[in-house]
Amino acid sequence: MIERFIEAKKQIDSARNIALSTHEDPDLDGLGSLLALESVLRNMGKNTYAFIADNIPKSLKFLPHQKITDNLDPEKIDLIIGLDYGSSERLEILKSY
């Protein structure tokens, strides 16, 4: 199991532009984990792109976020990190691109 974490760290270290996405119809778990990881990656000096195709529910607008996008240039993304999704069919960024 530790090998997966080591590989993930290598991928993150080598990426400059990282897109983050969660499942369709994001809830507090998905959106919260996306925003938390975005903050960590920005503190590491990474360019991050929080991707959500759906609208953020009004009940979650209180969460701190700088910018959430629903449009990316895939050519500019080095790494995609998916959060809080059970199957790839529910991962918004994969459905959009």
Image: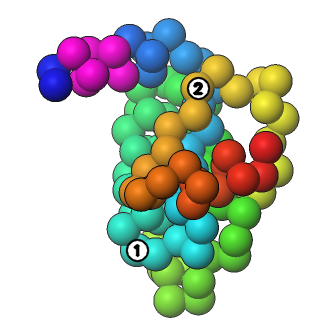
- The residue lying at 60 percent from left, 67 percent from top is 24
Examine the image and state in which quarter residue 15 appears. top right
Question: How many labels were placed on the picture?
Answer: 2
User: Dot 1, how many residues are within 10 Å of its Cα: few (below 14), some (14-19), or many (20+)?
Assistant: few
- The residue lying at 49 percent from left, 24 percent from top is 45
Boundaries of the magenta span: 3-9
Residue 13, relative to residue 27: is it above or below? above
> Where the C terminus falls, by quadrant?
top right
Q: Secondary structure at mark 1?
A: helix
User: Dot 2, how many residues are within 10 Å of its Cα: few (below 14), some (14-19), or many (20+)?
Assistant: some
Residue beneath disc 2: 79
Magenta region, mostly helix, strand or loop? helix
Instruction: Answer whether residue 7 is magenta in the image.
Output: yes
Instruction: From the viewer's perspective, tell me whether residue 54 is left or right of residue 84.
Output: right
Is residue 68 at all visible to an observer of this figure? no
Residue beneath disc 1: 28
> Where the N terminus falls, by quadrant?
top left
Pinpoint residue 85: horizontal percent, then vertical percent: 44, 57
